Image (tube, rainbow, N blue to C red):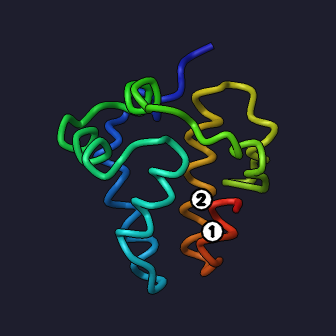
């Protein structure tokens, strides 16, 4: 089976789209960074390094310090697909991030998004 194109796409190419999406709904870049850092364990400097290096999604997640232990609580649909049912581990991580950004754009409280 062919590999998903998103795996080789630079994270830095998608990141501004995440920011634009939430800013159109009145949220901020800082909130996008907060949910991405919560998910991946990156700090602000580590996240910026990934963007500056233009690493692809595979490398972005491979170099992530630690996925948050509450990722199993991220459920729901992204593009009509249940994130908890995605079988490919890398695709699931990408869908988790998409879901968090979607929730941010939908106006959910940050405490709910971060599964606290």
Q: Position of residue 88 (x, y in %)?
A: 67, 25
Q: Position of residue 60 (x, y in %)?
A: 39, 32
Q: How far, Cα to Cα, is label 1 from label 2?
A: 5 Å
Evaluate if marks 1 and 2 touch, with contact meaning CB atoms under 8 Å apart.
yes
Which residue corresponds to the image point at 60% horizontal and 33% vertical from the top-left?
Answer: 91
Q: Position of residue 116 (x, y in %)?
A: 70, 62
Q: Quadrant of the N terminus?
A: top right
Residue 50 or residue 69, whichever sits in front: 69
Q: Which mark is residue 73?
A: none
Location of residue 57 with respect to 26 vertically, above or below: above
Q: Which mark is residue 103?
A: 1
Residue 73 or residue 6, whichever sits in front: 73
**Badge 1 local density, few (<14 within 10 Å), some, or many (20+)?**
some
Q: For mark 2, what is the residue?
A: 100
Q: Which residue sits furthest bottom?
A: 26
Location of residue 29 with respect to 4 vertically, above or below: below
Does residue 86 appear to the left or right of 22 in the view shown? right
Does residue 107 appear to the left or right of 6 in the view shown? right
């Amino acid at each position: 089976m062919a590999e998903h194109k998103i795996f080789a796409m630079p994270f830095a190419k998608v990141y501004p789209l995440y920011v634009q999406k939430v800013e159109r709904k009145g949220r901020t870049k800082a909130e996008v960074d907060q949910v991405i850092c919560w998910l991946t364990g990156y700090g602000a400097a580590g996240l910026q390094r990934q963007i500056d290096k233009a690493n692809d999604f595979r490398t972005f997640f491979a170099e992530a310090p630690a996925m948050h232990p509450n990722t199993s609580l991220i459920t729901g649909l992204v593009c009509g697909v249940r994130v908890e049912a995605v079988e490919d581990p890398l695709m699931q991580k990408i869908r988790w991030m998409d879901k968090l950004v979607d929730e941010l754009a939908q106006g959910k409280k940050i405490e709910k998004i971060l599964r606290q």
